[in-house]
Image (cartoon, rainbow, N blue to C red):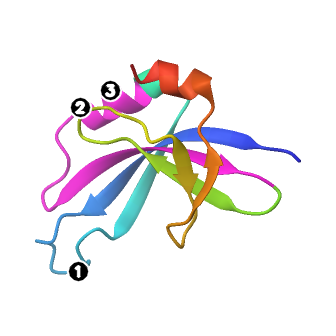
Amino acid sequence: MTVFYEWDVETHADGNSPEYADGEVVDHRFCASFKEAVLVASRPAPTNFRWAVVLVRDDDDRRSWAYLAADNQMPSFFSDSGGVEYARVPTRFLQQTQ
């Protein structure tokens, strides 16, 4: 099975936008590294939006996500679009966030 990983900084509506529902993803900034993603997310988000740093996992079966918590903690598992834990986050990515 082929597996690809990519860091992304998603732009989420914060609940104050007249156009988007709270938490709706409206944009992506794919990054070459965790360091770059954190740098992007350290800048002020546009008005009515917030950033979410996420490691995206694509394989032959599905796409899944591991969202970085506010304290820069990475979950142990990726979750699919239904919220079901799908695959373990590789150690190398967990180490990058520490």
Q: Which residue is pictured at 33% across the width and 48% down the height? A: 52
**Contact, CB < 8 Å: mark 2 with mark 1?**
no
Q: How far from the left and from the top, in percent, is residue 29?
A: 45, 45
The C terminus lies in quadrant: top left
Q: Amino acid at mark 3?
A: Leu
> Which residue is the site of mark 3?
39
From the image, state whether disc 1 or disc 3 is nearer to you: 3
> Which residue is the site of mark 1?
19
Q: Which residues, given as a range, are shown in magenta?
A: 36-59
Classify 10 Å Cα crowding around label 2: few (below 14), some (14-19), many (20 and above): few
Distance in Å between CA atoms under marks 2 and 1: 24 Å
Per the rendering, the mark at residue 57 is: none
Residue sitting nearer the eye, 66 or 7: 66
Q: How far from the left and from the top, in percent, is residue 72?
A: 31, 32
Residue sitting nearer the eye, 6 or 69: 69
Q: Which residue is pictured at 33% across the width and 55% down the height? A: 11
Residue 54 is inside the magenta segment: yes
Distance in Å between CA atoms under marks 3 and 2: 5 Å
Q: Which residue is pictured at 33% across the width and 33% down the height? A: 40
Classify 10 Å Cα crowding around label 3: few (below 14), some (14-19), many (20 and above): few
> Which residue is the site of mark 2?
42
Q: Is residue 73 above or below residue 45?
A: above
Classify 10 Å Cα crowding around label 1: few (below 14), some (14-19), many (20 and above): few
Q: Amino acid at mark 1?
A: Glu
* Among numbered discs 2 and 1, the one appearing first in the sequence: 1
**For residue 87, side relative to residue 9 (left or right):** right
* Among numbered discs 1 and 3, the one appearing first in the sequence: 1
Residue 55 is inside the magenta segment: yes
